[in-house]
Image (cartoon, coloured by chain):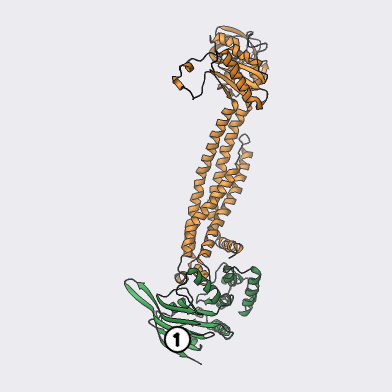
């Protein structure tokens, strides 16, 4: 479902060209659970951004569900992000002035879904992450773990194909980190393709497939049972 | 994205940052309020002035000697240099016009008024009793030129309040003989009026019969003939009749000018309309200042909310949607500020009306519409730049930017 062909991403830093990704070839199948690891500057975040269509490669192709995304404009990419991709961030990225319910509702608001259907789906998502009783709390009234669960609910409410998680437990204590990991792994079991970027080896080793990056190249790609 | 949702999202930002919202509301509402108040003053002044004129009567025609029209030869028109006098006989000839209710010939000059060794220079008006009727003057005592007609001038006079108090003090003036120039006349009444007429302070004038006036000043021409027309709808026909009758009497030369009181009123009206609009547009400048303030605040908002913009993009917001969200936020700020300003402006004019009952504060309807419109337009214009900046943010940078 995801295929990268000789994909490169270069950044200009001063006079120097930095190869954040250097001719990466990668294939990820439906319903896989992949973790991407690497030290800072290895290119793992760039890879995730490109997979999430937040960033575009300098060269090479990214084929998502059989569609080559290289020639898409901003709006087309926004459309794909809206329907096929869910994001979970290290720092949650909830909108502080909105309630949990409204935060989860946001992707559907943006795609113009009618309020009745939104209500139904938000409630399902809230139940899925176990926060039905927190629906009218604002982020500041929620714990870190609860915030991340709201963010997860938001990421799945549009029923995407892929969930991209960038250090999802990075800002959480061990207990709530475990809850969050358990939640996204359950989503993976239910059929969602899960790609997690982490530098936490313990978390990386939970996945079915571990990809290691260094200097913009894949140096290790192994299946784990 | 639904309009209701856009409005809701913009609304949440206004609630979330109350201090910012209140400051901007104040800025915009002061602008709108200034427009309302200044135009109310301008409009009030117009109403006051035109009201004063209207009290003189809108159904008056004023006939004066000479042609004042700028068309034709202007100063080089030799025929216009020495117009034929407008005589008492001319005035009398107008009585044949059915549409005319009253005619008051007027001659003006200055002479000394004396009584019992006291003397003062006084502006003199020579006219007939119709004059006081047209001007709607009340008498403090006595009557206004009794028995006087255009032809017949018994030696009587009416005096203003100031003339009375200076020459007669506390004594009764009515019935006393006084001297005006080299004539003697008996005071028939004291005028109660305190305003102005034909540019003169009524309290300072002495009014004498018109024929006595022409004799006193040794002048064969009247200064004006004031014509009171029965029916305002017949003004133009009456004007034509006057012109043709006088023309026939003046050897077929149209050497008089007939103006409507209304035309004078109209030009004052126009002047004050322009004044009100000028005041309004000066006040509108403050609306644009408020607009620039909104732009600054929105630019700050865009950089403060970078992470949020990045997030919105990540969850599928199109650039256009981000743009709309920020523009709507700016419009809501300026719009609610404008509405607040309208409420404040109208409330304050009502308070001013109570505080200054003599002056009528009239905020014109257009001022409300225009100021609301200008506020909204400046909201849109000054909201566009920040919104565009927000829409063009790179999602990766925005997400990793300040939280």
Q: In the figure, B122 relative to A158: above or below? A: above
Question: Residue A197: x percent and y percent?
Answer: 47, 81
Q: Residue at x 47, y 58 (%)?
A: B385
Q: Residue at x 46, y 62 (%)?
A: B389
Number of callouts in the render?
A: 1
- Residue located farthest toward the front when viewing the structure as drawn: B252
Question: Residue B183: x percent and y percent?
Answer: 57, 7
* Element on which disc 1 rests: strand
Q: Residue at x 58, y 43 (%)?
A: B366
Q: Is residue B127 visible?
A: no
Quadrant for the N terminus of chain B, please.
Answer: bottom right
Q: Nearer the viewer, residue B249 or A26?
A: B249
- Quarter of image, res B153: top right
B370 left or right of A220? right
Q: Which chain is home to disc 1?
A: A
Q: In the figure, A115 relative to B286: above or below? A: below
Q: In the figure, B341 relative to B144: above or below? A: below
Q: Nearer the viewer, residue B334 or B235?
A: B235
**Residue that numbered label 1 is attached to:** A211
Q: In the figure, B104 relative to B293: above or below? A: above
- Residue located farthest toward the bottom when viewing the structure as drawn: A225
Q: Which chain is represented by orange in the image?
A: B
Q: Nearer the viewer, residue B292 or B112?
A: B292
Q: Colour of chain A?
A: green
Label 1 neighbourhood size at 10 Å, few (<14), some (14-19), many (20+)? many
Question: Residue B332: x percent and y percent?
Answer: 56, 57
Q: Is residue B368 visible?
A: yes
């Amino acid at each position: 479902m995801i295929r990268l062909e000789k994909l490169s991403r270069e950044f200009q830093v001063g006079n120097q060209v930095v190869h954040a990704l250097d001719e990466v070839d990668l294939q990820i199948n439906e319903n896989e659970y992949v973790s991407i690891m690497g030290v800072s500057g290895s290119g793992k975040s760039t890879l995730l951004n490109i997979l999430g269509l937040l960033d575009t490669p300098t060269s090479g192709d990214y084929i998502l569900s059989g569609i080559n995304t290289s020639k898409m404009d901003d709006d087309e990419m926004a459309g794909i992000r809206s329907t096929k991709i869910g994001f979970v961030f290290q720092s949650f990225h909830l909108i502080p002035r909105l309630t949990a319910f409204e935060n989860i509702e946001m992707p559907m608001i943006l795609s113009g879904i009618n309020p009745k259907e939104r209500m139904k789906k938000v409630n399902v998502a809230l139940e899925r992450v176990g926060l039905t009783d927190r629906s009218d709390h604002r982020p500041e009234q929620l714990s870190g773990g609860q915030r991340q669960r709201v963010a997860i609910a938001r990421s799945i409410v549009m029923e995407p194909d892929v969930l991209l998680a960038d250090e999802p437990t990075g800002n959480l204590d061990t207990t709530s980190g475990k809850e969050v990991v358990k939640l996204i792994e359950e989503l993976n079991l239910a059929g969602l393709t899960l790609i997690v970027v982490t530098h936490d080896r313990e978390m990386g080793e939970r996945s079915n497939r571990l990809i290691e990056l260094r200097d913009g190249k894949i140096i290790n790609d192994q299946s784990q049972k | 994205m639904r309009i209701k949702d856009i409005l809701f999202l913009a609304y949440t930002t206004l609630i979330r940052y109350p201090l910012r919202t209140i400051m901007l509301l104040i800025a915009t509402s002061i602008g709108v309020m200034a427009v309302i108040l200044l135009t109310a003053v301008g409009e009030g002044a117009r109403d006051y002035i035109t009201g004063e004129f209207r009290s003189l009567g809108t159904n008056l025609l004023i006939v004066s000697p000479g042609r004042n029209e700028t068309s034709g030869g202007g100063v080089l028109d030799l025929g216009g240099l020495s117009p034929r006098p407008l005589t008492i006989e001319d005035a009398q000839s107008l009585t044949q016009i059915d549409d005319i209710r009253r005619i008051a010939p007027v001659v003006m000059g200055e002479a000394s008024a004396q009584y019992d060794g006291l003397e003062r220079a006084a502006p003199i008006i020579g006219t007939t009793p119709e004059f006081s009727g047209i001007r709607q003057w009340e008498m403090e005592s006595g009557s206004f030129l009794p028995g006087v007609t255009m032809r017949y001038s018994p030696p009587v006079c009416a005096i203003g309040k100031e003339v009375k108090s200076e020459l007669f003090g506390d004594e009764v003036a009515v019935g006393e003989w006084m001297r005006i120039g080299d004539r003697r006349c008996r005071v028939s009444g004291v005028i109660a009026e305190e305003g102005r007429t034909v540019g003169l302070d009524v309290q300072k004038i002495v009014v004498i019969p018109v024929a006595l006036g022409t004799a006193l000043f040794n002048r064969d021409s009247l200064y004006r003939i004031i014509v009171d027309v029965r029916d305002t709808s017949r003004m133009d026909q009456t004007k034509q009749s006057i012109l043709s009758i006088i023309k026939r009497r003046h050897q077929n030369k149209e050497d008089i000018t007939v103006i409507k009181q209304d035309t004078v009123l109209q030009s004052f009206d126009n002047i004050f309309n322009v004044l009100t609009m000028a005041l309004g547009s000066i006040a509108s400048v403050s609306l644009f200042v408020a607009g620039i303030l909104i732009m600054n605040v929105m630019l700050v908002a865009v950089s403060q909310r970078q992470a949020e913009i990045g997030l919105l993009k990540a969850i599928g917001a199109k650039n256009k949607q981000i743009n709309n969200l920020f523009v709507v936020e700016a419009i809501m700020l300026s719009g609610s500020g404008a509405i607040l300003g309208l409420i404040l402006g109208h409330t304050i004019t009502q308070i001013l009306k109570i505080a200054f009952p003599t002056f009528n504060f009239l905020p014109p309807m257009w001022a409300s519409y225009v100021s609301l419109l200008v506020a909204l337009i400046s909201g849109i214009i000054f909201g566009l730049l920040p919104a565009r900046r927000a829409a063009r943010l790179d999602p990766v940078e925005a997400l990793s930017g300040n939280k």
